[in-house]
Image (spheres, grey):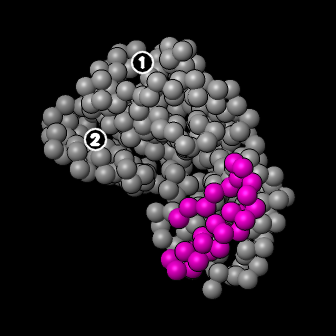
Amino acid sequence: MIDLLHRRLADLEGADAALVLASGRAAIACTVLALLRPGDHVLSSAWLRPSTRAFFQQELAGLGVDVTYVNPSDVRAWRRDMRRSTRVLFVESPVIENGRVVDPKPLRTLGQELGVAIVVDASGASPAAATPLASGADVVVHDARVRLLSVPDAEAGVVCGTDAVIDEVRSKMHVWGAVPHASIAERLLNDLATLSLRVAHQSHVAHAVARAVAMAAPEGVTVHYTGLESHPDHHLAAESLRHQGPVLQLQCPSADAADRLAQRLIRHLAAQARPHGAEIRLAESPDTVRLHVGLDEASVLIADLADVLRDGVA
């Protein structure tokens, strides 16, 4: 069954091969370790999940690998910060923590010109929304909990790329004890069968909710969603993503206001007791609340948010 799962994942990404590992963190770690040697340099987007940044900062330095972080909105920074020892360009897009989208074109140009490997963490998109290999990436990684699994109650990571890269990653997986649990293959195969439907529905609902909340948001609350024209990456997201995703960000006037809003939303949604419904999380930015759309109906979720936001966020 695991071989069938690997083939299915590779086909979805348009890759030669794929590999399932114990977690998304393991997928990133084993991929980077497979591509780098002591003395090498990684040029990474500064927009990263905390777990990825922690691995880069805490582990790679001890292995003799330097990492430089680039503000990816400055497209010239990629070329400016390249070194002769740069072996990997790393990017997360869409960015789970802040909802931003990174332009792949500058990376593709550098990768083709200088022979540097481009690694994309596409957990926030899934193959239903984007296939980075078609845009010039060499390796794609996923944290399966983010989009691939229908319910994020298990851990698995995915790496897709060439046969040679996957062989190297597989070797690291065994050395570092990152072999996935035996039960995950059947679970992932079943959930991949509904992936496109889930992503399409969640994106449709999130877009409708974002529009409705943006029109009726109380003073001080700003809605960030790539499907809205007000989003700084709206046009880039429209070009690079087939679906805009299930997550919208509610930016509040302060961290305290965000915490209060999050707690009110959590209590309200919990009282509805809808299975596979929306979830509320605080973002890395302390003044922002992330709303993760589940299998909700748009009209029902809009009404829920209107009830909570009616009294403002003060």
* Residue 279 drawn in magenta: yes
Residue 165 placement (x, y as % from top left):
36, 21
**Left or right: 311, with 136 as reference point:** right
Q: Quadrant of the C terminus?
A: bottom right
Which secondary structure dominates the residues rendered in magenta?
A: helix
Q: How many marks?
A: 2
* Residue 117 drawn in magenta: no
Q: Residue at x 15, y 44 (%)?
A: 62
Q: Nearer the viewer, residue 38 or 188?
A: 188
User: Which amino acid is tagged 1?
Assistant: Thr
Q: Are marks 1 and 2 in contact (CB under 8 Å)?
A: no
User: Which amino acid is tagged 2?
Assistant: Val
Residue 162's disc is: 1
Query: For residue 218, which quarter of the picture?
Result: bottom right
**Left or right: 133, with 151 as reference point:** left
Residue 42's disc is: 2
Q: Residue at x 52, y 32 (%)?
A: 132
**Left or right: 135, with 70 as reference point:** right
Residue 248 placement (x, y as % from top left):
64, 58
Q: Is residue 46 above or below residue 160?
A: below
In whole angstroms, how far apart are the C-alphas of marks 1 and 2? 20 Å
Tell which circle, 1 or 2, labels the residue nearer the N-terminal end. Answer: 2
Q: Start and end of the magenta stretch?
A: 255-282
Q: Residue at x 28, y 41 (%)?
A: 42
Q: Residue at x 15, y 36 (%)?
A: 39
